[in-house]
Image (spheres, rainbow, N blue to C red):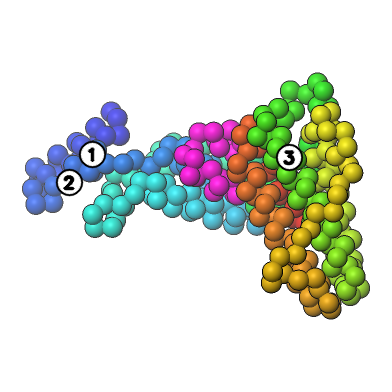
Amino acid sequence: MTSSSRIFAACLTAALAAPLAACSPLDVFGPRANGEIMSLAQHASADRVFGDGKWSEMRAFHAEQLKDEARRLCGTNDAGEVPSSCDVTYGDTDLPAAGEAEELLTLTVEAADKVPDESVDLVIAQAIDALALEPVTLDPVADQDNADSDSAVTDEDDLEAVRAMLAEENAFSYGLDIALAHADTDLRDRIAALKKASDQRVRALGALISEEHPDWDSPAPGYEFTPGNTEPANPAEAAALVKQLEASVNEKWRRTAANAQSTEWREDAIRLAAHAQRGPA
């Protein structure tokens, strides 16, 4: 029996027993929770049960986020309530846990083409946050042989995104150099570590476009101060600039990952976004 048939049968039984409490037609024909979103929520719930520590806590939060997203997609009725047809329980179906961040990355890359467009930001952000729980390796990105690899970036929009993020990383590094002039000892160490991490991302990005853009490793200075955003003059202002630079590059990486067109670049961009968010050890 289908889900709608079961609901209809339950409503009919209720209506015969107590007509005043009969179900609304919306209980039968109303909006349903998005299946792809609920599948991801169920995976997250399984991770919560079978995982531990920070991973379990994060995945519990992810499960609730996804259930909230399913409700949001269903919309509300005239009373401002989510229709009862929008069932966000998991039912009797068991799904395996993703198990770890790398498995979640694979699941997310595939799911991003199936969930509603307006939900892509959320599922991509969850994968980034999950990967960033632990140190992130860029080897799967940087070690590609783009002349022969099936995973090379070929979509023109994605290639433009690669080039744009190369420029952003160069601007990030240049901005850090500006902050360095007024940094105290601790901040100087932090800047050195941030620049090293940025260089790793730049090399990984360069591996994606070196065949078509051989001069990628000769960047021009790219950081510009805007009104209200002035060059630092003391250690406190230098620290504030570094914090701003980190927030900016992280936000741009998250947006880039969410906007990826191909599965190949989506996976790379999620990994690079997590690397940036994680920051240096």
- Which comes before the other along the chain, label 3 or label 1? 1
Residue at the spot of label 3:
162
**For residue 106, what is the image quadrant?**
top right
Answer left or right for 18 relative to 25.
Answer: left
**Distance between the Cα atoms at labels 1 and 2?**
8 Å
Helix, strand or loop at label 3? It is: helix
- Which comes before the other along the chain, label 1 or label 2? 2
Which amino acid type is marked by label 3? Val
Q: Which residues are magenta?
A: 106-126
Answer left or right for 85 relative to 165.
Answer: left
Which amino acid type is marked by label 2? Cys
Residue 28: which disc? Answer: 1
**Distance between the Cα atoms at labels 3 and 2?**
53 Å
What residue lies at 9% left-to-right and 52% top-to-bottom? 20
What residue lies at 80% left-to-right and 54% top-to-bottom? 222
Asked if marks 3 and 1 touch (Cβ < 8 Å), the reply is no
Helix, strand or loop at label 1? It is: helix
Residue 143: which disc? Answer: none
Asked if marks 3 and 2 touch (Cβ < 8 Å), the reply is no
Q: Is residue 53 above or below residue 15?
A: below
Given this view, does label 3 or label 2 mark the residue nearer the observer? 3
For the stretch drawn in magenta, the main secondary structure is helix
